[in-house]
C-alpha cells in the first residue's frame, strides 16, 4: 500500500474546528464512525520525579494508580488504567544498567517533562510487520511472554509512535479502574510530528484515515485520524523544536472537570463521542 499525504483539500475546505470544538463538540463528531485496524493503547508521560507526579495524579487530578516496577535499565513507572483498556503511564529514569531506551528518556527529559510516546494496538507483532511492508525494515521488535513491541529507532520521524500488543497483564486490584474523576478511557490524543505526511501514510496502512481538520492545543492547524474507538490529532512539529511532543490527551467522563496542564501535557475531558 502506498503512503498517502494528508489531503490539502481537507485542510482548506469545510470548517476548521478549534481544539476545544474537537474535544467537546455538541455536534456529532465526524471521526466517530471511523473504523480502523488500530486503536489507542496508552500514552507515556516522562517525568523527573515519579513519586511527586504520582501524588499529583492521585490527589489533585483524581486518578487511581496501579504500581509499576523498577526495570533493569533504571526506568520506573506507574500506570493509570481505564475500563476501556486504554491507559496513561508515568515514566521516570533512575539508577540501573542503561540501555538505548533509558538513554532516550534521559535525553528527552533534558528538555523538560512531557508526553514522550503514544502506543497503538494493531494486534500481534507479526500482523503489524505485515502491514508495515517496507517500513518493517526500519523497526525494532521486542517480544516477551507478556507483551510485544514494534518501535522505530531513535531519530526516526515516526519514533513518537509505537505499537504494543499485550498477551497477558497482571490483574487490576479492586479500585484501580475506578477514578475519583470518573474517567473511563482515552478518547483522543494530539501529537506533533516532524513528518506529518509519513505519519499519515503509516496510519493509512492500518485503515486509519483523516476524518476532520482540527487545531491542536497550541492553535496549530492539523488533521484528525479516526482509530478504533478513538482518534489521533497530528500537527507539524514547531520550527526549531528539539523534539516532537505529545501535546494533549482528551478523556471520557460523565462529569468533565476543568482542563489542566500536568507535566507538559494538556489533559481535557469530554462527555460523549470517541
Image (spheres, rainbow, N blue to C red):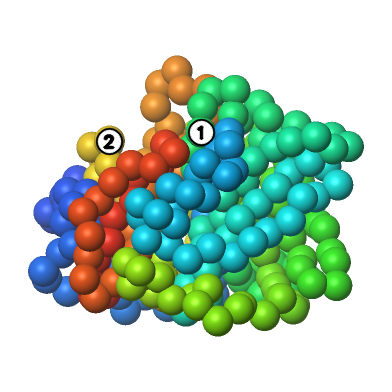
* Front one among 269 and 159: 269
Residue 224 relative to residue 52: left or right: left
Q: Quadrant of the N terminus?
A: bottom right
The secondary structure type at the circle numbered 2 is loop
Residue at image point 60% right, 78% down:
173
The residue to which callout 2 is attached is 218
Q: Position of residue 164 (x, y in %)?
A: 67, 64
Q: Position of residue 68 (x, y in %)?
A: 68, 59
CA gap, disc 2 and disc 1: 17 Å
Residue 214 relative to residue 5: left or right: left
* Front one among 168 and 117: 168
Q: Position of residue 246 (x, y in %)?
A: 46, 44
Residue at image point 29% right, 55% down:
268
Q: Position of residue 224 (x, y in %)?
A: 34, 56
Residue 171, visible in the rendered structure:
yes
* Front one among 188 and 268: 268
Mark sitting earlier along the chain (2/1): 1
Residue 214, visible in the rendered structure:
no
Q: In the drawing, what numbered circle is on residue 185?
A: none
Residue at image point 32% right, 66% down:
181
Q: Quadrant of the C terminus?
A: bottom left
The residue to which callout 1 is attached is 113
Residue at image point 69% right, 70% down:
165
Amino acid at each position: 500500500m502506498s503512503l498517502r499525504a494528508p489531503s490539502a483539500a481537507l485542510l482548506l475546505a469545510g470548517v476548521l474546528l478549534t481544539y476545544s470544538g474537537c474535544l467537546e463538540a455538541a455536534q456529532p463528531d465526524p471521526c466517530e464512525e471511523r473504523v480502523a485496524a488500530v486503536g489507542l493503547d496508552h500514552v507515556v508521560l516522562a517525568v523527573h520525579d515519579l513519586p511527586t507526579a504520582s501524588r499529583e495524579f492521585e490527589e489533585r487530578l483524581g486518578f487511581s494508580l496501579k504500581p509499576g516496577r523498577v526495570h533493569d535499565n533504571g526506568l520506573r513507572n506507574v500506570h493509570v488504567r481505564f475500563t476501556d483498556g486504554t491507559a496513561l503511564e508515568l515514566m521516570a529514569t533512575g539508577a540501573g544498567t542503561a540501555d538505548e531506551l533509558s538513554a532516550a528518556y534521559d535525553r528527552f527529559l533534558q528538555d523538560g517533562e512531557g508526553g514522550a510516546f503514544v502506543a497503538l494496538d494493531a494486534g500481534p507483532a507479526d500482523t503489524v510487520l505485515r502491514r508495515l511492508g517496507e517500513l518493517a525494515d526500519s523497526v525494532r521488535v521486542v517480544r516477551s511472554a507478556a507483551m510485544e513491541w514494534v518501535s522505530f529507532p531513535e531519530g526516526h520521524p515516526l519514533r513518537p509512535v509505537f505499537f504494543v500488543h499485550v498477551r497477558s497483564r497482571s490483574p487490576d486490584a479492586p479500585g484501580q479502574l475506578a477514578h475519583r474523576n470518573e474517567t473511563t478511557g482515552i478518547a483522543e490524543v494530539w501529537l506533533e510530528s516532524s513528518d506529518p505526511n509519513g505519519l499519515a501514510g503509516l496510519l493509512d496502512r492500518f485503515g486509519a484515515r483523516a476524518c476532520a481538520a482540527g487545531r491542536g492545543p497550541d492553535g496549530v492547524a492539523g488533521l484528525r485520524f479516526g482509530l478504533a474507538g478513538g482518534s489521533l490529532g497530528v500537527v507539524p512539529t514547531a520550527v526549531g523544536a528539539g523534539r516532537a511532543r505529545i501535546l494533549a490527551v482528551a478523556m471520557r467522563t460523565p462529569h468533565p472537570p476543568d482542563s489542566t496542564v500536568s507535566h507538559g501535557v494538556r489533559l481535557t475531558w469530554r462527555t460523549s463521542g470517541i
